[in-house]
Every structure is written in C-alpha cells, then in structure tokens.
Image (cartoon, rainbow, N blue to C red):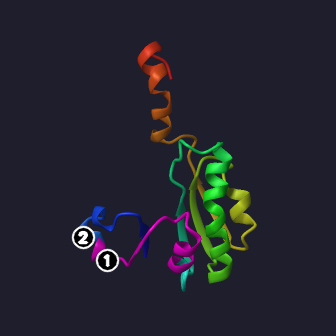
C-alpha cells in the first residue's frame, strides 16, 4: 500500500502491484486508513520549506503517523531521516523503529542556490 496525493503520477507498472490510498500521509485519517492491518511501515517525511523549523517539519508531520502506529498495531517502522530527526517521536510510539540516516539530501542543495549562483559556494 502506498499513500500518494495524485495517483495519476504513479507509473502504471507500480499501480498494478500496490493498493493506493489517496491523500497526504500527514493527515491523521489517511494514515489510520493506510496503516490498518499493516505490520511494517516505511516512513519518509517530505521536505517542507515553509515549516517553522526543521524539527517542526519532522515532528509535526510524523505525529499523526505515530498515533496511527499505536491505534492500528503497527509493529515495525523504517524511516528515512537526517541524523537525529524525528527519532524520539517514533521511538515513543511503541514500535520497533530504525532510521536510515543520510548526512544530507539533494533537495537540501536547493536551499543554497542563491549562494551557489552569487558566490560560487555551498
């Protein structure tokens, strides 16, 4: 099962192999529905340049999922994260949590476009 905002953007070959839940995985009702009968969840928080802080982007977006992990009986969660992000929130959700951490992601470079263009530095 995958959660997507626009199912038409999912390649047909993938649509044939998965059940699709339409919506945002930041929406409590959507994740509750998507996690029903799930034993394991792969969790990826999308970038949010409008968030008040990096912690808010991770924790606020993940909180509905943590509630759904508990209510729907999810046992295992693998998350993609920057080092230290949203791990305490997931760890307190009563699941076996493992984070795949990267020191940086390519979308982080977009925040530095101005300095790259004007000064030639990252």
Tell me which segment is drawn in magenta: 15-34
**Callout 2 crowding tier (Cα within 10 Å): few <14, some 14–19, many ≥20:** few
* Picture disc at residue 37: none
Looking at the picture, how far across and down is residue 10, in whole percent? 30, 64
Tell me what residue is drawn at x 69 percent, y 49 percent: 84
Q: Is residue 107 left or right of residue 13?
A: right
* Location of mark 2 (residue): 13
Mark 1 is surrounded, within 10 Å at the Cα level, by few (under 14), some (14 to 19) or many (20 or more) other residues, namely few
Q: Which image quadrant is residue 43 in? A: bottom right
Residue 32, image x, y percentages: 57, 77
**Residue for point 65% across, 57% down:** 60
Which quadrant of the structure image shows residue 37?
Answer: bottom right
Q: Is residue 92 left or right of residue 71?
A: right
Q: Residue furthest top?
A: 119
Q: Residue at x 51, y 48 (%)?
A: 47
Relative placement, left or right, of 77 versus 20 is right
Q: Which residue is mark 1?
A: 17
- Image quadrant of residue 72? bottom right
**The stretch drawn in magenta includes residue 18:** yes
Give the answer, above or below, for where 117 lies relative to 39.
above
SS for callout 1? loop
């Amino acid at each position: 099962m995958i959660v997507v905002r626009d199912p038409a953007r999912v390649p047909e070959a993938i649509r044939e192999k998965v059940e699709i839940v339409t919506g945002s995985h930041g929406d409590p009702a959507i994740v509750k529905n998507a996690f029903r009968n799930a034993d394991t969840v792969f969790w990826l928080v999308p970038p949010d340049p409008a968030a008040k802080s990096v912690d808010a982007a991770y924790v606020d977006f993940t909180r509905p999922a943590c509630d759904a992990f508990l209510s729907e009986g999810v046992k295992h969660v693998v998350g993609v994260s920057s080092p230290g992000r949203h791990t305490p929130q997931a760890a307190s959700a009563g699941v076996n949590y493992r984070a795949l951490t990267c020191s940086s992601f390519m979308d982080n470079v977009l925040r530095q476009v101005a300095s790259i263009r004007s000064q030639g530095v990252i």
